[in-house]
Amino acid sequence: MLTEFKRRYQDFIATRKLKSSKRRDLIVDFIMQTKGHFTIDDIYPQMLKIDRSIGIATVYRTLRLLVDSGILREHSFGEKRGYFELLPLHTPLHDHLICTDCGKIMEFQCQSIEQEKRRIAQQYQFSIRTHKLEIFGICAQCQQQKNSLNIQT
Amino acid sequence: MLTEFKRRYQDFIATRKLKSSKRRDLIVDFIMQTKGHFTIDDIYPQMLKIDRSIGIATVYRTLRLLVDSGILREHSFGEKRGYFELLPLHTPLHDHLICTDCGKIMEFQCQSIEQEKRRIAQQYQFSIRTHKLEIFGICAQCQQQKNSLNIQT
DNA sequence: ATTAATAATGATAATTATTATCAATTTCAC
DNA sequence: GTGAAATTGATAATAATTATCATTATTAAT
């Protein structure tokens, strides 16, 4: 069975005149099944279990490929390393709230931000590939913790 | 004369019980006068002209300080190194369009995105410190160039 | 099926930006 | 002035990613 992601991946390979390969197919198959955000360190050890000989460079290369093809989106979330996530087609993009205290990341969707984004792109005759909206601050739980600490002291 | 930025910097120093220092004052004075986005490499050579003995670590430390105090905002713009920009108070935040072809960065302001951002934060009881919205794609000029190339071939 | 051209691979060196360390110096409340 | 604490410059360390390169795999054309 050919999933949406797989189809998009194969299209990308074809239009760029790249060659398919066992290793890359394996990595792509694995990534297709991920949920949420992940780093290289999250997935590389699991890939080694499937194929002991996969080099980390190939994983990096494949991630780059999938980002370029629009299948993955990369975030930094204020950190040095990259986080990746699948972007299904025909699903509105979501954005992120990042707690700078506990590191928690929450997703939200906002139709009107999407709309405004497109309106501005049009105004600048800018052709959008992707976008990232990260809101940094303190989550509800961390605010409560801080409050209770203040009361105790 | 005490500028708005200087006042905010001194407040921050005071509330964190830090000490002032010649070096840091010098760096802060310099940064106050910057316009637009800059990296360490943009400003460090100029600082050396003012004081030959300033170490790059001190500049990094001071930048971090100013980001923490909300005077500077840091962006990655899809690159590894950090870009910084002054955030004046009482001025609505702006966002960025980034051309992945030529690297050009355009700023825009959108009141309704700001509004939606605040609405969502409220919904999640999230206390906003700052935000970054980066829209990646191809600018008008680069699109034209591509079109004309296609016609020629 | 063979070949020839090109792409992919793993290992690892290189890069690059930033942070950590630390002894010496500076600041500042008392 | 004194002493505790913060700051400093030099530089080592870190950490994530990319570049290099010899070898292997893939593919299109024969």
Image (tube, coloured by chain):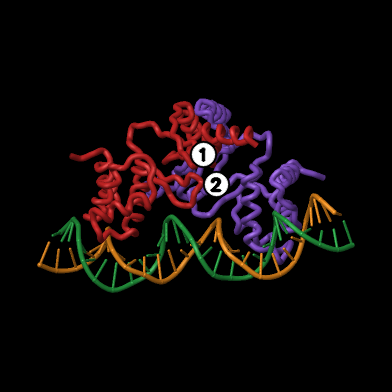
Chain colours: A purple, B red, C green, D orange
Q: Tally the numbered discs.
A: 2
Q: Which residue is mark 2?
A: A75
Which chain is mark 1 on? B
Relative image position of residue C13 (x, y in whole percent):
54, 70
Which chain is mark 2 on? A
- Who's the residue at 45% across and 39% down the image? B131
Front residue of this view, candidates A17 and C20? A17
Relative image position of residue B67 (x, y in whole percent):
37, 47
Dot 1 amino acid type: Cys
Q: Tell me the crowding category of disc 1: few under 14, some 14 to 19, or many 20 or more residues within 10 angstroms, Cα based.
A: many
Q: Which residue is mark 1?
A: B99
Can you tell which quarter of the image residue A21 is in? bottom right
Front residue of this view, candidates C21 and A4? A4
Left of B93 or right of it: where is A9?
right
Left of D2 or right of it: where is B12?
right
- On-image quarter of the C terminus of chain B: top right
Left of B56 or right of it: where is D25?
right
Disc 2 to disc 1: CB gap under 8 Å = no
Is residue A153 visible to us here?
no
